[in-house]
Every structure is written in C-alpha cells, then in structure tokens.
Amino acid sequence: DSGVTQTPKHLITATGQRVTLRCSPRSGDLSVYWYQQSLDQGLQFLIQYYNGEERAKGNILERFSAQQFPDLHSELNLSSLELGDSALYFCASSVGGPTVDYTFGSGTRLTVV
Amino acid sequence: QKEVEQDPGPLSVPEGAIVSLNCTYSNSAFQYFMWYRQYSRKGPELLMYTYSSGNKEDGRFTAQVDKSSKYISLFIRDSQPSDSATYLCAMRENNAGNMLTFGGGTRLMVKP
C-alpha cells in the first residue's frame, strides 16, 4: 500500500455521463496530481493542486475539472464522457515544493461504453 | 513527435541478463530524470532519479544521463523474474513546478 488511496478501482459508464474519481493523498502530503494513462498517449499530466489551490495545469480537457478539499483529498470530475476517455486515471501526492518524491495510487480504471 | 520517446518493447531476457532501457528527449530544459517501475494494475513507483548529467547506482540498478545527446539509460544487472514490469522514464524542468513528462514505457519480461 503506497499510502495514496484512489476510489473506485473500476468504473464502467456510458457515453455522455459524468463521473467523479476520488483521491486521498499520503499522510502529510499537501500536493495532489492527476494523470491519465492510455495505451496510445502514455501517462499524461492533467492537473496539480497544492493545499487547496490549483498549482499547474496540463492537457486537461474543458470537460474535466478537479478540486482539492480542506482535508486535502481531491476529486477529478469527468463529464460528457466519450469513448476516448477510457483510461487509467492516477493520482499522486507529494509533500509540496520542488521534489521528485511522488507517490502514486493504484489508479481508477474508467471504461466508457 | 513526443517530448520523450521510449521503445515500448516488449523486451524479453533470460534471468541473470543485463538489461538496458533507454529514453530520448527533445526538451533541453529538463534537469531531473527519473525511472519508475509499474507492475500490472499498480501505480508507478520511483526507482531512481538523477539531477542533470552523470551516473547514479543503487544496488542492481544504474541510471545514466547524457544531456549533450538528450539520452538517458537504466541498466539492470543480474535481472530477476521479479523485475518483470513496465519501466517508465520521466523528466522535469528545474522551475516548472513538479509536473513530470513521461515516456510511453518499456515492458520488460525476465524469464526464469
């Protein structure tokens, strides 16, 4: 167990629907990162939050949004889902500040049918 | 063209072999170079990182960075079946927050 908890582990939903993925960071970590892993694109950075504030944004679609709550857990909201959104979504956490010490969760596998 | 290129494999070797995994990149601003190991149905875990150019050794693993050629390598000595996994290189600029740019990963299979 890495200390980063992601729920649910698997999610199957229909096109056009909206889902929420949840991440609890490792104890003591203030930063949360969301990554999408697909077969053709590899691991792609989506967005970072630090202590509740958005810190950096990657190639995140407008249909996707995220937030980090006061208890530091984070949620990634995916709406108007398309078949191409099927992927593994990983959350990682770190203490914050310049670091290479990320801890990844086990991911949520999203299947859009 | 992707910023970080990595041969997807799969790479199949016998137990005990020396394994060489490589990545090339195009962004000269990358300063931190990392190798992650990812087992099936798990998240990536950090193996090693190197800052700027040079070599770093940790047990059976050696990471090399050649910034002049924009080329990084991970060597695994005395490979074991438990090393079978996907290996991802990742890179970060010095002042770009903590955003990592990953290679696509190389799948390694070590056969007993």
Image (cartoon, coloured by chain):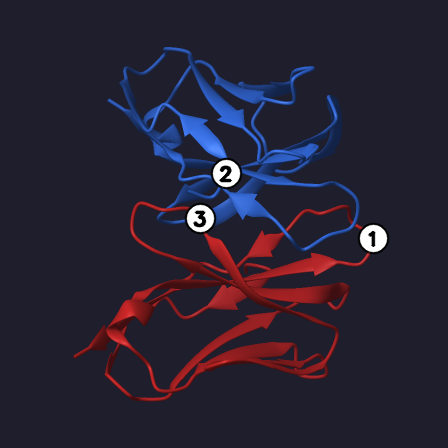
Chain colours: A blue, B red
Quadrant location of the N terminus of chain B?
Answer: bottom right
- Residue found at x 58% / y 31%: A60
Q: CA distance from mark 1 to mark 3?
A: 24 Å
- Check disc 2 and give the amino acid type: Gly
Asked whether the residues under marks 3 and 2 belong to the same chain, the reply is yes
User: How far from the left and from the top, in percent, is residue B34?
Assistant: 59, 64
- Within-10-Å neighbours for mark 1: few <14, some 14–19, many 20+: few
Task: State whether discs 2 and 1 lie on one chain.
Answer: no
Q: Is residue B105 visible?
A: yes
- Residue A113, placed above or below residue B96: above
- The x, y position of residue B83, in whole percent, is 33, 70
Disc 1 target residue: B95
Q: Of marks 3 and 2, which one's residue comes earlier in the chain?
A: 2
Q: Quadrant of residue A82?
A: top left
**Location of mark 2 (residue):** A3
Q: Chain of mark 3?
A: A
At label 1, which amino acid type do we have? Asn
Which of discs 2 and 1 lies nearer the camera? The answer is: 2
Q: Can you tell which of label 3 and label 2 is closer to the viewer?
A: 2
Q: Which residue is mark 3?
A: A41
Name the kind of residue labelled 3 in the image. Answer: Gln
